[in-house]
Image (spheres, rainbow, N blue to C red):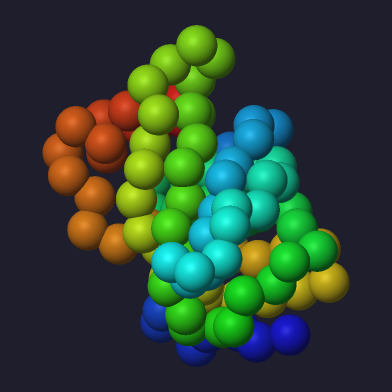
């Protein structure tokens, strides 16, 4: 398991969730389909057997609200556990931030 130093960890509250997330670790590979188990303004935890390399970049797509708009963004893998991996969003635009905030 890889953990970030305390100064790099998320400070925002996490909300338990359960929605599908497509994630892709390379442009050559296909998407994996798993569930998110928590969400915060800065990222999410994806319950998955497919564990990307810590600190790598993944592409994620998900709808945080039922019948809502799709979020499509890149995220940095912050840590990997036996249950899945944490991913911090990279460069969200204000509209996407508002969409995620509406699910919290």
Q: Is residue 89 visible?
A: yes
Above-or-below relation of 57 to 20: below
- Determine the image quadrant of residue 59: bottom left
Q: Is residue 91 above or below residue 8?
A: above
Residue 42: image quadrant is bottom left
Q: Which quarter of the rendered picture does the N terminus lie within?
A: bottom right
Residue 28 image position (x, y, % from top left): 49, 69
Looking at this view, name the residue that lies furthest to the top. 67
Residue 104 appears left or right of 54: left
Looking at the image, which residue is at 17% across and 44% down? 93
* Left/right of residue 13 with respect to residue 94 in the rendered view: right
Give the quadrant of residue 37.
top right
Residue 91, position as x, y percentages in the image = 22, 58
Q: Give the residue at the far left of this rendering.
A: 94
Q: Is residue 37 visible?
A: no
> Is 97 or 7 nearer to us in this picture?
97
Q: Percent x, y for residue 81? A: 76, 73
Count of all numbered marks drawn on residues in the image: 0
Residue at 43% x, 16% y is: 68
Which is nearer the eye, 6 or 44?
A: 44
In the displayed structure image, the side of residue 64 where residue 2 appears, left or right: right
Whether 39 is drawn above or below 8: the answer is above
Task: Identify the residue shown where x is 80% and y is 64%.
Answer: 49
Question: Could you say which is closer to the camera, residue 6 or residue 23?
Answer: 23
Image spot of residue 63 (x, y percent)? 48, 28
* Residue at the image position 75 percent from the left and 58 percent from the top: 48
């Amino acid at each position: 398991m890889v953990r970030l130093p305390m100064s790099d960890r998320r400070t925002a509250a996490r909300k338990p969730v359960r929605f599908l997330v497509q994630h892709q670790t390379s442009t050559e590979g296909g998407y994996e389909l798993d569930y998110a188990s928590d969400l915060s303004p800065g990222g999410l935890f994806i319950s998955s057997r497919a564990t990307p390399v810590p600190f790598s970049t993944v592409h994620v797509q998900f709808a945080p609200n039922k019948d809502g708009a799709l979020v499509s963004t890149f995220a940095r893998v912050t840590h990997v556990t036996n249950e899945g991996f944490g991913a911090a969003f990279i460069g969200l635009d204000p509209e996407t931030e508002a969409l995620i905030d509406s699910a919290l």
